[in-house]
Amino acid sequence: MAADAEVLLCVGEPLRRYGFPDGHPLSVDRQQAFLDEAQRRGLATAVQRLAPRIAGADELLGFHGRHYVEQVVSGSQRGTGWLDYGDTPCFPGILEAAGAVAGTALDAASRLVAGGALRSFQPIGGLHHARRDAAAGFCVVNDIGLVIERLRREHRVRRIAYVDIDVHHGDGVYYEYEDDPELIVVDIHEDGRFLYPGTGHAHERGVGPAEGSKLNLPLAPGATDAEFLRAWGAAEEFLRDRRPQFIVLQSGVDSLHGDPLAHLALTPQAHGYATERLCRLANELCQGRLMVFGGGGYNLANIASGWCAVLAELLRGSWR
């Protein structure tokens, strides 16, 4: 496989540490559950590894406000309390753990733009609830927002498509770019009337100059692959019409059947299909460039099977 056809797999000890203590649903076991299954399937040896890098507090200012970054620094030093209203606790070293998610994502984006790889997969990432000035929903930093800002500021990539199939609406991305016509959003999630964060309704399509640049596709509780595939048809047509230069996928597996925090009933095949189709679209429109983040998921068996389905399609997609 040529260097520019490889898949970057972004894993390592600094990323493993992004998890919360005392029985929190987002535990530090998630990366290893995936890696064990990837190794069993022979996927882990077919990739190019990208070692994690911890972003400094100053780099977090690429998306987040200074006052909020100072809150994270203080919370990390204190090691107790909360960064939000009760979902995202502090622990000693949380700044470094979140910094690893951010720094690794930024490095992967730079590698893809430079042609060192076509795809990247960062299982511990996709923290799509964090706002510029606040943590939310287990998300300390918004690595996706940081990547979007870096791609635009340093690499002059403007038309970016953000695709989110996590069971929860990616509110921290959607609302921060709600009025940005060049940030194309497609978000398939459980209907916000039944699940956190309660947003992402079908009528939300962007505002002002960005009206029509966003597509929210809520699914009813209990929805299966059949409903997902119907939504995906609309999603793919929407993306193709808007011709992005770069695609970011948040592939949260909390939408799989049996996740303890949600109510959809998808299988790993849905995530594999979405990844396969985005590989094709990226090859056609984006010089192959596709970044994928693992997002949510709180059932370790689902994490293992769902993320392996994503990685398998990324590897196959490099040959298309």
Image: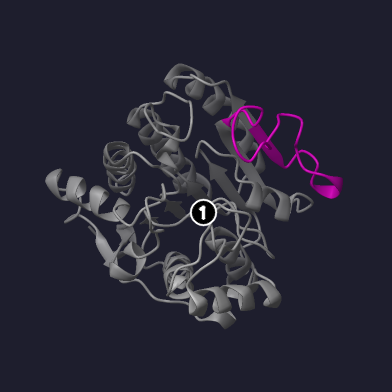
Label 1 Cα neighbours within 10 Å, binned few <14 / some 14-19 / many ≥20: many
Which of the two residues, 151 or 265, is positioned nearer the viewer here?
265
Amino acid at circle 1: Phe
Q: What stretch is highlighted in magenta?
A: 190-216
Name the residue located 22 percent from the left edge and 57 percent from the top edge.
Answer: 1
The residue labelled by disc 1 is 138
Which of the two residues, 26 or 174, is positioned nearer the viewer here?
26
Answer left or right for 48 relative to 208. left
* Chief SS of the magenta region: loop
> Secondary structure beneath disc 1?
loop
Residue 257 forms part of the magenta stretch: no
Report x, y in % for residue 38. 20, 48
Name the residue located 70 percent from the left edge and 76 percent from the top edge.
Answer: 67
Residue 198 forms part of the magenta stretch: yes
Q: Quadrant of residue 304?
A: top left
Q: In which quarter of the image is the C terminus?
A: top left
Which of the two residues, 79 or 287, is positioned nearer the viewer here?
79
Which of the two residues, 191 or 229, is positioned nearer the viewer here?
191
